[in-house]
Image (cartoon, rainbow, N blue to C red):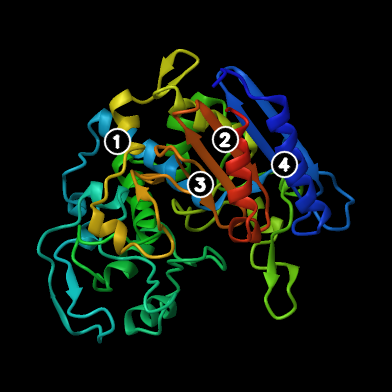
């Protein structure tokens, strides 16, 4: 294995992604693959299917759930500063979640509960084992009373749009009125823990979440374009998702670029950030460098190891459902724990955003790979897996 990206491998990657754009699976994307000091960035296609606006390197993307690992990294900064402790109950900063009740059975009425056997900890939020999240069994979002109640309360615990109307303090109060689905620490469940963690981090730092992320992460890394809103909304492409009735990619209206021109009422730590490929690359390469940026430590190597090491038991991985299978989970991000179709070598880490953004670091190959689109189908119709497999092979 050489120490550089191969020209032939990058050409295969370019050809594969260009073919998907030519086949009208998506209008365009920006991709980046790095190894050591080598940085390869490409723009392919356009903002929209009309081709009027070409994709640019500085295009702003709704990065969705790639927000989660950024929030987790900042959480570990607060741990290192002594403002949080991984083992402490969240009750000190989130009294709304003290003395939890837990559903007696997941499909049961909300008033049939048992006491929580222990409080939710800070680490439970990072590992998504707080006892509440998206349900995927017997199918996605089943019509159980707890799911219906959360929807009626407009907590927006899964897909981020349309947005919740509550500011953080009111949101956590409303959320705290619901029982947990499972005992704290018992299972991995997606998304809700990151929303709660965003409120916790804001209170621990004594500042709005946007300010905490900016001062501790974005500014030190030079991520000038990353945030919960922008003054340049015309740099955001439209979002596409296939209409399963017609089979055609359809422009979505729930999150128009204009919505991102003003600060959100509730800044979502689960999926609320905008970013560029270059900004997110700075974050990813900081982790790959053991927490250092331009020689300066932002995170300890121990914190980076905790973030990027699987924290789940075999049982928790086995019961995580389709949103995680077959991966493990560190703090705020997935960790490949065994060989798969993308790589025969486990250990890569990262996460995807539901609008169509992909990121992973592969420590074995010293590769960082990013593919940013605004087409959700890229994630589950083969684009994501093909991109990652070809990006990693370019280092072999």
Q: Quadrant of residue 169?
A: bottom left
Task: Name the outermost residue toward the top.
Answer: 295
Q: Residue 181 location in percent, x, y?
A: 26, 71
Number of labelled discs? Answer: 4
For the residues labelled 1 and 2, the Cα–Cα distance comes to: 23 Å
Q: Secondary structure at mark 3?
A: helix
State the quadrant of the N terminus.
top right
Other-residue count near label 4 (Cα within 10 Å), few / some / many at <14 / 14–19 / ≥20:
many
Q: Residue at x 51, y 49 (%)?
A: 341
Residue under label 3: 66
Residue under label 1: 306
For the residues labelled 4 and 3, the Cα–Cα distance comes to: 16 Å
Q: Residue at x 44, y 74 (%)?
A: 140
Nearest to the observer: residue 379 or residue 134: 379
Q: Earlier in the sequence, mark 1 or mark 4?
A: 4
For the residues labelled 1 and 3, the Cα–Cα distance comes to: 17 Å
Q: Secondary structure at mark 1?
A: helix
Q: Residue 278 location in percent, x, y?
A: 63, 32
Q: Secondary structure at mark 4?
A: loop
Q: Earlier in the sequence, mark 1 or mark 3?
A: 3
Residue under label 2: 392
Nearest to the observer: residue 214 or residue 133: 133
Q: Earlier in the sequence, mark 1 or mark 2?
A: 1
Residue under label 4: 59
Q: Eyeballing the image, is 298 above or below 235?
A: above
Q: Quadrant of residue 346?
A: top left
Q: Quadrant of residue 50?
A: bottom right
Q: Residue at x 40, y 81 (%)?
A: 142
């Amino acid at each position: 294995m050489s120490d550089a990206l191969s020209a032939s491998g990058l050409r295969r990657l370019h050809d594969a992604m260009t073919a998907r754009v030519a086949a009208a699976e998506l209008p365009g994307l920006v991709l980046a693959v790095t190894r050591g000091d080598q940085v390869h960035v490409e723009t392919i296609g356009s903002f929209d299917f009309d081709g009027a606006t070409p994709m640019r390197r500085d295009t702003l993307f709704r990065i969705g759930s790639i927000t989660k690992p950024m929030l987790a990294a900042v959480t570990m900064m607060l741990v290192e500063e002594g403002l949080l402790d991984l083992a402490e109950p969240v009750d000190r900063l989130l009294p709304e979640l003290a003395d939890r009740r837990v559903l007696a059975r997941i499909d049961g009425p909300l008033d049939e509960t048992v006491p929580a056997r222990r409080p939710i900890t800070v680490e439970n939020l990072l590992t998504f084992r707080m006892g509440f999240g998206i349900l995927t069994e017997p199918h996605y979002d089943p019509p159980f009373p707890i799911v219906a109640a959360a929807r009626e309360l407009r907590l927006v615990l899964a897909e981020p749009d349309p947005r919740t109307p509550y500011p953080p303090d009111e949101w956590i109060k409303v959320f705290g009125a619901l029982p947990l689905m499972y005992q704290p620490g018992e299972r991995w469940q997606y998304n809700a823990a990151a929303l709660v963690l965003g409120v916790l981090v804001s209170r621990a730092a004594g500042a709005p979440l946007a300010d905490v992320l900016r001062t501790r992460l974005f500014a030190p890394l030079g991520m000038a374009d990353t945030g919960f809103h922008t003054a340049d909304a015309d740099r955001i492409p439209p979002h596409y998702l296939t209409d399963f009735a017609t089979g055609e990619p359809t422009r979505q209206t729930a999150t128009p670029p204009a919505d991102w021109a003003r600060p959100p009422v509730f800044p979502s730590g689960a999926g609320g950030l905008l970013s560029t490929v270059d900004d997110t690359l700075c974050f990813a390469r900081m982790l790959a460098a053991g927490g250092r940026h331009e020689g300066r430590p932002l995170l300890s190597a121990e914190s980076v190891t905790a973030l990027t090491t699987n924290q789940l038991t075999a049982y928790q991985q086995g019961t995580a459902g389709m949103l995680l299978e077959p991966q493990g989970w560190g703090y705020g991000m997935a960790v490949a724990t065994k060989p798969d179709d993308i790589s025969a070598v486990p250990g890569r880490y990262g996460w995807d955003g539901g609008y169509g953004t992909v990121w992973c670091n592969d420590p074995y190959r010293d590769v960082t790979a990013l593919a940013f689109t605004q087409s959700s189908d890229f994630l589950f119709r083969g684009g994501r897996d093909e991109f990652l497999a070809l990006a990693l092979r370019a280092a072999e």
